[in-house]
C-alpha cells in the first residue's frame, strides 16, 4: 500500500488539487455561470504565494492565506464588473481576464521570471494538506447546499426572475459565489506553485481554465462527487494512456465527447444508467 | 513606415476577420459557440500544405481544397456534436465542452499524421516577391492575403444576400421555428452553415500559414482566442461587426507593438474586450439581432 | 391618507410601440382593485413595471408617496410588493414548501450557522418550515408541501405561487390571471382567499379574464385598451360602460 502511494503520489496529489479547483467552477455552474477566470485567479494566488515564501521569507500557511485573500479580492472586483454580462459574454470576459493576467505574468520578469518561469520553488505542499483542504471545501459546499441558501442556488439556476421577485438580490448572491470560487482558485494556485517546484505563465492560461471547468461537467454538475470524479479522470486517463502522446489526446477527446453526448448527468450518472440497462 | 504598418495590420486583420466571420456565422444562425473552430483552421492549413507540397498544385487550388476539407470538418462537428446536443436540449456549456473535445481529437489526429514539429509552406514565387509603394516594402503575400480575404467575404455576402440558400440561412437565423413553418429544410441549412463556417476557417488557415511561414498542430489555440476577441468586438452573431472587428484587431495589434512593445500584443485585444464589455455589454457593434444571444 | 400605490402618467414604450401610455390611477389601502382589458392591452406590462421586472419609460410610481419607479424587483419585494405571474414561475425542482420558504422574510440562517451547522440552524429551519406550511394551508395546498412543484397540477401550482407571494409579507399583492386553468371549485376558493386578503392588511391588484371573479371580488376596476386607460369605477358602472363594451367587442372581432 505504501509502495503504491509512493509510486503514484504525484498522480494522487494532482487528483486532489484539481478536484479542489474543480469545485470552484462547480459552485458557479450551479447558478449557470460558465467561468474561465480560474487560470487568472490561480496565477494571482500562485505568484503572490511564491513571492512571499521565496523573497519575503513568509512561512507556507500565511502565504497561502494571502493567496486566498488576494484572489478573492480579485474575483470580487472582476465579478462586480462582469457578472452583469449575460451568458457567453460573461464567459468571454472571464477568458479575457485570464489571458490578460497571463500576459502580464509573461512580461513582469522581476516577479514571474517571464516566459521561462520560476525555478526552485520550495516543495511545501503535502498530500495530507491537499486532502484536508479538499475535504474542507467539500464539507463547506455540502453544508451550503443543504440549507436554505442551497435552495436559493437551485432556484437561481432555474429562474432568476422568480428569485428576485421573491425579494433576493441575485446579483449579490452571484458575486458572493464568484468571490468564493476566487478563494478556491487562489488557494489552489498557491498549492499548485509549491507542489511542482516550477511554474510558468503558460500553466495558468486558457487551457488551465478550460480543464478546470470541464472537470465538473464531465463528472456531473449536480452531484458533489462530480468534480472529484471528473478531475480525477482527467488526471488519471493521460497517465493510464502513456503509450502515445498523440493517442492520449485523441482518447481524452473521445472520452469527453462520449460523456457530453451520452451522459447528460456526467460520469456520476454512469452506474444509474448501467443499472437501468441491466434491468430492462 | 506608416503605410507599411497599415498593410501589416490590415493583412493580419483580414485573416482574423475571415476566421471570425465563420465563427460568428454559426453563432448568429444557430446560437452555437463552436470551440472546435481553431482546430478546423489548423486542419485547413495542413490540407493546403499537403496539396502544395505533395500534389504541387498552385496556391488558389490549395486554398480551395483546404476550404473544402475544413468545411467538411465543420459539417462533422454539426453531425457529431451540435445536432445531437440540440436534439436533446442539452445545456449550452455541453456544446462548448463538446467543441473542445472535438478540437482535442482533431489536434491529436494532426499530431499523429503530420507530426508535432513546426513546418512551413515551400518557398515559391509569392514568398519573396515584394513591391514598393509610397516608400514601403510590401510583400506580395500580404496583398494576396488581403485580396483572398476580401474575396471570401464578398462571396459570403453574395451567398447570403442573393441566393435561396442565403435567404434560408437568414430565415433560420431569425428563428428555427419560423423557418420550419415556411418549409425551410432547417437541418440541411444548418449543415450548410457549418460547411461555410468551416471553409472560412480553413481558408484563413492557409493564408495565416503563408503569411507567418509556420504550420503546427497547436496553431489553432491562438487563433481561437483571437476569434473570440473579434466575436465580442463585433457583437456575437454580427457578420459586418466581425469584419470590422477583425481588421480593427489587426491594426490595434500592429500599433501596440510600436507603442508598448511586442510583449503585450496579445493582451491589447483582450484588454479592449474587457473595456468594451464593461461599457457596452453586448459588444461594439451590437444590433437588435444580437440581443437574442 | 396617501394611497398605498399611485401611478402618475406611466408609459412604457418598446421601440416605437407604446405598450402603456399615460396610465394614472391609485390603489387605496386595503382595496381589491381589478385591472381588465383585451389581450395585449398592457396589463402584464403594467404589472411588470410596478413590480420592477421592467422599468417605465416615463412617469412616476409612488409607494407610500415615495417614488419607486425603476427600482429592481428584489428591492420592491423588500418594500412590500409581491406578485404572481401569468405563466407560473415556480421552481420545478424544488418542493412546494421550498418554493414558499424561498420568499419568507423571517430571518434565515447566517453564514456561520450554515457552515458550522450550529444547533440554531435546525431551529431556524424548523420555524421557516412551519411558516411555509401555514401559508400552504391557507391557499389550500398543504397536502402537497413535499411534492416537487414541477409535478403538480396547474391549479395547485397557481395556489402555491400565491403562497410564495404571501410569504414575503407584502402590503401590495399583484395577481396576474390567478384563476387561469383552475376548475370551478378552485375558482370559488380562490375568490374567498382574495376577498379575505384586505382583512390581513393587504391591497390587491388583480388582472383576470374571469369576469365573475373580477366583478365579485373587486372594489373598483380599471380598464386598459391598447395601453391606454379607458375607464375606471365600480364594477357595475364599468360593466355597462359603452367604451369598455366596444373595446372587448372590437377585440373579439379582430
Image (cartoon, rainbow, N blue to C red):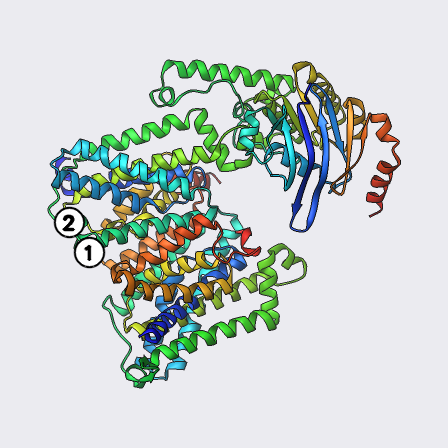
Q: Secondary structure at mark 1?
A: helix
Q: Nearer the viewer, residue B112 or B147?
A: B147
Local secondary structure at mark 2: loop
Q: Position of residue A263 (x, y in %)?
A: 43, 45
Depicted C100 relative to depicted B54: above or below: above
The Cα–Cα distance between marks 2 and 1, rounded to whole angstroms, is: 9 Å
**Residue B90 appears left or right of B100:** right
Question: Around disc 2, counting alpha carbons within 10 Å, would you say few (fewer than 14), some (14 to 19), or many (20 or more)?
Answer: some
How far from the left and from the top, in percent, is residue C224? 76, 37
To which residue does mark 1 refer?
A115
- Chain of the residue displaying label 2: A
Would you identify the image quadrant in which residue C243 lies? Answer: top right
Residue A218 visible in the snapshot: yes
The answer to whether residue A13 of the structure is visible from this angle is no
Q: Which residue is mark 2?
A: A118
Disc on res. B237: none
Q: Nearer the viewer, residue B244 or B101?
A: B244
Amino acid at each position: 500500500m505504501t509502495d503504491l502511494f509512493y509510486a503514484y503520489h504525484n498522480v494522487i496529489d494532482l487528483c486532489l488539487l484539481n478536484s479542489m479547483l474543480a469545485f470552484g467552477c462547480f459552485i458557479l455552474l450551479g447558478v449557470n455561470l460558465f467561468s474561465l477566470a480560474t487560470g487568472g485567479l490561480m496565477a494571482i494566488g500562485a505568484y503572490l504565494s511564491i513571492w512571499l515564501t521565496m523573497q519575503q521569507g513568509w512561512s507556507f500557511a500565511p502565504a497561502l492565506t494571502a493567496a486566498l485573500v488576494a484572489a478573492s479580492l480579485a474575483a470580487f472586483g472582476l465579478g462586480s464588473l462582469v457578472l452583469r454580462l449575460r451568458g457567453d459574454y460573461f464567459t468571454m470576459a472571464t477568458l479575457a481576464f485570464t489571458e490578460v493576467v497571463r500576459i502580464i505574468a509573461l512580461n513582469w520578469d522581476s516577479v514571474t521570471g517571464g516566459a521561462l518561469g520560476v525555478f526552485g520553488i520550495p516543495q511545501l505542499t503535502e498530500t495530507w494538506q491537499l486532502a484536508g483542504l479538499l475535504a474542507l471545501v467539500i464539507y463547506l459546499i455540502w453544508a451550503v447546499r443543504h440549507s436554505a441558501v442551497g435552495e436559493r442556488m437551485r432556484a437561481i439556476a432555474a429562474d432568476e426572475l422568480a428569485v428576485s421577485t421573491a425579494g433576493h438580490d441575485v446579483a449579490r448572491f452571484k458575486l458572493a459565489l464568484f468571490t468564493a470560487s476566487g478563494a478556491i482558485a487562489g488557494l489552489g494556485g498557491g498549492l499548485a506553485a509549491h507542489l511542482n517546484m516550477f511554474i510558468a505563465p503558460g500553466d495558468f492560461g486558457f487551457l488551465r481554465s478550460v480543464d478546470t471547468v470541464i472537470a465538473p461537467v464531465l463528472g456531473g454538475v449536480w452531484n458533489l462527487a462530480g468534480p472529484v470524479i471528473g478531475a480525477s479522470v482527467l488526471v488519471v486517463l493521460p497517465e493510464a494512456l502513456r503509450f502515445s502522446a498523440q493517442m492520449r489526446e485523441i482518447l481524452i477527446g473521445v472520452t469527453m465527447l462520449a460523456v457530453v453526448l451520452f451522459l447528460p448527468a456526467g460520469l456520476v450518472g454512469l452506474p444509474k444508467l448501467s443499472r437501468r440497462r441491466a434491468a430492462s | 513606415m506608416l503605410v507599411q504598418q497599415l498593410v501589416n495590420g490590415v493583412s493580419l486583420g483580414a485573416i482574423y476577420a475571415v476566421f471570425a466571420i465563420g465563427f460568428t456565422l454559426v453563432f448568429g444562425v444557430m446560437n452555437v459557440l463552436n470551440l472546435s473552430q481553431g482546430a478546423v483552421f489548423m486542419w485547413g492549413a495542413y490540407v493546403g500544405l499537403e496539396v502544395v507540397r505533395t500534389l504541387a498544385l498552385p496556391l488558389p487550388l490549395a486554398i480551395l481544397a483546404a476550404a473544402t476539407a475544413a468545411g467538411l470538418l465543420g459539417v462533422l462537428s454539426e453531425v457529431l456534436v451540435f445536432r445531437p446536443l440540440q436534439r436533446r436540449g442539452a445545456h449550452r456549456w455541453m456544446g462548448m465542452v463538446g467543441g473542445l473535445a472535438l478540437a482535442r481529437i482533431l489536434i491529436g489526429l494532426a499530431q499523429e499524421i503530420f507530426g508535432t514539429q513546426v513546418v512551413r509552406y515551400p518557398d515559391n514565387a509569392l514568398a519573396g516577391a515584394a513591391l514598393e509603394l509610397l516608400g514601403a516594402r510590401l510583400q506580395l503575400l500580404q496583398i494576396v492575403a488581403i485580396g483572398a480575404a476580401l474575396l471570401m467575404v464578398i462571396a459570403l455576402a453574395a451567398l447570403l444576400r442573393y441566393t435561396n440558400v442565403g435567404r434560408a440561412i437568414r430565415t433560420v437565423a431569425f428563428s428555427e421555428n419560423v423557418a420550419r413553418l415556411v418549409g425551410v429544410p432547417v437541418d440541411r441549412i444548418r449543415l450548410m452553415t457549418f460547411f461555410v463556417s468551416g471553409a472560412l476557417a480553413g481558408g484563413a488557415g492557409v493564408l495565416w500559414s503563408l503569411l507567418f511561414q509556420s504550420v503546427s498542430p497547436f496553431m489553432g489555440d491562438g487563433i481561437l482566442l483571437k476569434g473570440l476577441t473579434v466575436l465580442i468586438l463585433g457583437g456575437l452573431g454580427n457578420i459586418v461587426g466581425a469584419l470590422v472587428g477583425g481588421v480593427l484587431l489587426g491594426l490595434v495589434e500592429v500599433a501596440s507593438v510600436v507603442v508598448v512593445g511586442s510583449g503585450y500584443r496579445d493582451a491589447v485585444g483582450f484588454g479592449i474586450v474587457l473595456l468594451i464589455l464593461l461599457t457596452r455589454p453586448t459588444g461594439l457593434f451590437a444590433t437588435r439581432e444580437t440581443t437574442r444571444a | 391618507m396617501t394611497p398605498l400605490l399611485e401611478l402618475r402618467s406611466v408609459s412604457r414604450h418598446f421601440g416605437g410601440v407604446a405598450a402603456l401610455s399615460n396610465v394614472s390611477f391609485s390603489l387605496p389601502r386595503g382595496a381589491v382593485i381589478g385591472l381588465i382589458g383585451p389581450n395585449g392591452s398592457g396589463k402584464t406590462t403594467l404589472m411588470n413595471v410596478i413590480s420592477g421586472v421592467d422599468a417605465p419609460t416615463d412617469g412616476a410610481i409612488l409607494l407610500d408617496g415615495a417614488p419607486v419607479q425603476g427600482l429592481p424587483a428584489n428591492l420592491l419585494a423588500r418594500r412590500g410588493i409581491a406578485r404572481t405571474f401569468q405563466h407560473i414561475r415556480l421552481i420545478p425542482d424544488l418542493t412546494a414548501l421550498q418554493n414558499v420558504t424561498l420568499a419568507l422574510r423571517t430571518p434565515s440562517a447566517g453564514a456561520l450557522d450554515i457552515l458550522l451547522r450550529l444547533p440554531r440552524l435546525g431551529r431556524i429551519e424548523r420555524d421557516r418550515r412551519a411558516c411555509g406550511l401555514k401559508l400552504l394551508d391557507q391557499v389550500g395546498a398543504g397536502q402537497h408541501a413535499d411534492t416537487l412543484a414541477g409535478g403538480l397540477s396547474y391549479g395547485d401550482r397557481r395556489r402555491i405561487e400565491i403562497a410564495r407571494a404571501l410569504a414575503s409579507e407584502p402590503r401590495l399583492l399583484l395577481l396576474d390571471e390567478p384563476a387561469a386553468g383552475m376548475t370551478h371549485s378552485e375558482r370559488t376558493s380562490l375568490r374567498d382567499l382574495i376577498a379575505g386578503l384586505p382583512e390581513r392588511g393587504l391591497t390587491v391588484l388583480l388582472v383576470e379574464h374571469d369576469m365573475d371573479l373580477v366583478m365579485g371580488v373587486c372594489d373598483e376596476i380599471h380598464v386598459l385598451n391598447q395601453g391606454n386607460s379607458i375607464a375606471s369605477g365600480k364594477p357595475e358602472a364599468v360593466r355597462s360602460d359603452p367604451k369598455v363594451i366596444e373595446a372587448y367587442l372590437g377585440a373579439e372581432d379582430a
